[in-house]
Amino acid sequence: MSTTAGARRAGSARGRARARIPGGSLGSAIVSTVMIVAVAATAMLPWWPIYESPAFVHAAGVAIITGAAIGFAGAVWAWPSWAVASAIAAAYLVLGVPVAVPSSAYAEVLPTAEGLVELVAAVALSWKQLVTISVPVGSYQSLLVPPFLLGLIVTATAVTIALRTARPSSALLPPALLLVVGIVLGVVHDEVAFEAGVAFLVASIAWLVRVGIAERRAAVVDRSGESALVDVRRIIGATIVAAVALVGATAATFVLPTGQRDVVRAELRPPFEPSDYDSPLAAFRAAFEPEVADVEMLRVTGLPAGAGLRIATLDTYDGIVYSVGDSDRSGASGQFSRLPYRLDQSATPGEEVRLDVAVLAYDDVWVPGVGQLERIAFAGARASTLEDEFAYNDVTGTAGVRSGLQREDRYAADSIAWIEPVDLAELRPGGAVLPDSPDPPDALLRLLDRWTRSSDEPGVRLAGVVEGFHREGYVSHGIGEEDVPSRSGHALDRIAELATAKPMVGDGEQYAVAAAMLARSIGFPARVVVGYLPSGDDAADDGEVTFRSPDLQAWIEVQADDGAWIAVDPNPEVRPIPERQPDEPTVVSRPQSALPPPEDPTPVEDLAAEPDSGSDDPDRGAGWLDAILAVLRIAGIVLAALALLASPFLAVVAAKARRRRLRRRARTLEERIEGGWEEFADQATDYGYPMTQTATRAEQAAVVGGLGPAVLASVVDRAVFGPDGPGDGDDERVWAAVGELQRRMDEPRSWLERARARVSIGSLGGYAGSRKGAGT
Amino acid sequence: MTMTPEDATRFASNLDELVGAVEEILLGKNRVIRLAFTALLSEGHLLLEDVPGTGKTSLARAMAQSVAGSSNRVQFTPDLLPGDITGVSVYDQRSGVFEFHPGPVFANIVLADEINRASPKTQSALLEVMEEGQVTVDGQTHRAGQPFMVIATQNPVEQAGTYRLPEAQLDRFLMRTSIGYPDHASTIRILEGTDQRAHDHRVEPRLDADQIVEMAAMARTVYVDPTINDYVSRLVDATRSATEVRLGVSVRGALSLVRAAKTHAAGRGRHYVVPDDVKALAEPVLAHRLILDPEAEFDGVTASNMIAQVLIETPPPSARQAG
């Protein structure tokens, strides 16, 4: 009786819940879903200024529609909450890469392994990146993940609340959250803020009106006249509210000043922003002014012989300035962070170096050092300020303090640096990824071709470039009246000028940039380093080096295949500069020629090879080859990922196979028979039978049930505990029985259950082993 | 000499017959009957802790009838004297000699009902005959029955006016168990037979006393692998090291367990002991030999719980001992 009453109560409650769903029918549910989609879409509007890209519209649209579909399907087929959550997770993984991380999708459609990894990591990491990057961000990296993920979850949750709960009006809460998050993560000045707010308000009111009408209909279902009257009143009331809101908001748009909003982005202040400071290479020439020629900048103890003192490592080149860090600071080289107590550099190749640096006239924000920093300790009156401001980028090994170093500042730095001399010809390129840079000027590439024609080996070519600069280059800062003119700067035109001038004249600023570009053309990750190189009279007897302003130099670092960054100095020795040669008369004397004559006559044997490299067919072939290689690469990655995922299961299967083989081939007859039983018991364990460690064989057989296991247990017990021991051939009979019993255990089960048993680690705990140990 | 598989088969067949015969009287109590016969064939004695009216006397009488032996019942009371059990020597004026009048202990199966109601002195009178199977009166030794088994009972509920059995005497009982109330179906069957007095039931003898003695001798020859002895030793050690136990199982207890396990194995048609025999008998053979720590008792720990715990924590052997 009570059960019936309980069931009745439960049915009544369900009926009430259904009645609160607007309309209660499938058609009504579709209308409700569409309205929730509209509310979610308006809640997405504050996100637009962050992206300002069609990719955002695509991502938001896919997220909202997919989330709505999941919520709708969950309501129609009464999915449990875990199923809805699983569907959201699956949708995120399947759609996430092409929609939210399009740069990592193959053909912008198919997810890649790297994309999936990026997608999963972005769940935690993209939020911070979003508020620490310049906007608009477009579809950069995985920054579309926040609106995509939130849109998916919010819409699915809102539709679920709208269609399945007794309070469908609460469905507005998730979109409201989406709206608020969009505002908080958004931009300081948002021109569409009012419009977005009003649109959300109107959509929300529309939903609330619909919910109210549905509830009223449910309450006065038998009085259709009254119901209709109520509907009309509510619609009129809602229209008035929406109209007032629209008018007020529109007026406010014109009346109120577009003030600055408090958003997360405005509150975040990175410890050190490299783009706030001039590139140290930009002021390179100033160090050689005559008035600072004798100014002592830094006094350093502990600098390894032949090593330079780095001020900053520059890896970002926009064709005009070589600077520290990626221009939008989203690159790893542009992100400076506070240094913890100590950085683990155990994986960095090189040797321990301890530098003691005393600041003299040096007053820049960059903190000079060598190699990769492990720890730093400041001394002097400003020690605590410097420690507080100190920021470090481990990718480039560059450090900085916002207030800059001043005279009497001191610090001790422990670093790992590569100081062994390296044969450039033996080097092979490393795999570091640097920010994109413009292509080298053609003149520079011609130099590369001329200097490195003899070999295809990257190391040999790099050595050829360095040797070429050393051989053909001359140094002039172009400051003094007696100096050969040499324009400062390292923009592309200046580099082209360096490559074409005869004689080649420049200084470290130009040689380092040109060498870095050529090294990158060869295939080496290369970056420019600005720092001090000790001259002959800098070093004191006690190993102390005092750097003067003209000791400033620029060189390059290339990464070898072992990950070490090798310092390479392309600067030629200072020597007398021959007189400038007249420009090539080509243009004047032979204006009809479309191409300048080659600088060197091409050897006859090389001419034969040129058509191959210049013809179109090989390009087309290379295109096909590239496509096939790309497909193979993706397939390989997918296979590797699958193998990685499957490896734990394969390891379990292999361990069991080995265990079975060892049991089957055990040394004694008794052990083989005992092993047979253990094999059977292990399979039972893997199928979930509660085989306990302290159970006897008969008890274990009883757990499995049936006559077969009981007989097998009895036979094995007789072999083990009987006075006569087992007879010849008993082991084969036992193993045959075990095989038969295992087959019987497998037969009634699905392939999925069998597969789960095969990869179960239940029997790998060693219960059999521990029982065996009990017997000894 | 070791029992042969054929002997084991015959032994199991005889035991099944005896158990089946007694089960006709004591319905639904196969396990207790089998335990009782295991005690008899292991030349041990049985302590039944039971409330009145559960069939203790019927069990003793039916067992005696099934083996064509004699049975006596002694109701222990506080004023019962040792001589009332063992017998007395009476002077015969006609012959002028003392003539021994055997007491109720001279039977194959003796039911000592409510043994804890007798004084310790009277209880101890049973010691010699339980251990040695003989009675010494006035310097003369008189053999008890062959086979000989004491089935003693005590009421676990009513404790007023009783004398707790001393540990030494408890240790002389091979097993302690209880018959308990019958299940529903058995109770129905018992009620259906109320037109017949309980004493009118009679079991036809299946074996004679000599055959029982022969079976007991045969049970001694069951093979016990060293791993089994090791297992028993570990079980006994575990009872001694348990914090809840003040006094663990004695060596006599370990011997009794192995002896009973042999009979149990033979009763299952095996001429060798397996760990299951030990586990099956561990509770009835060992539990009454434990003395628990008072605090553990206060916490609700019982001897049976302790044995069960020890069995869970002590892995049985699964392989023949190396070497």
Image (spheres, rainbow, N blue to C red):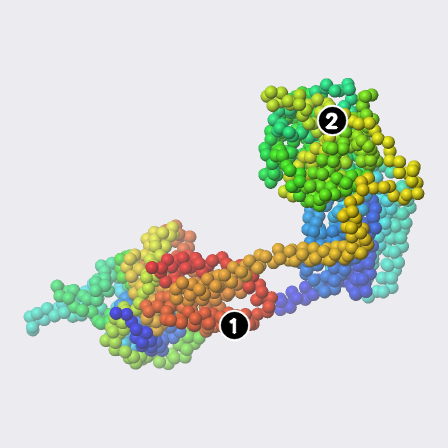
Mark 1: amino acid: Arg
**Closest to the observer, A307 or A381:** A307
State if disc 1 and disc 2 touch (CB < 8 Å): no
Where residue B255 sits, quadrant-wise, is: bottom left
Residue A153, percent from left and from top:
73, 53
Give the SS element for disc 1: helix
Q: Quadrant of residue A530?
A: top right
Q: Is B163 placed left or right of A146 in the picture? A: left
CA neighbours of label 2 inside 10 A, class few (<14), some (14 to 19), many (20+): few
Taking depth in this image into account, of A537 and A423 the one nearest to the observer is: A423
Residue at 89% from the left image edge and 36% from the top image edge:
A585
Residue A468: numbered disc = none
Q: Is residue B115 left or right of residue A434?
A: left
What residue did someone put label 1 on? A744
Residue occupying image coordinates x 80% and y 59%: A33
Q: Disc 2 to disc 1, how far (Cα)?
A: 89 Å
Q: Chain of mark 1?
A: A
Q: Position of residue A156 (x, y in %)?
A: 74, 56
Would you name the residue on which mark 2 appears?
A574
Which quarter of the rendering shows the C terminus of chain B? bottom left
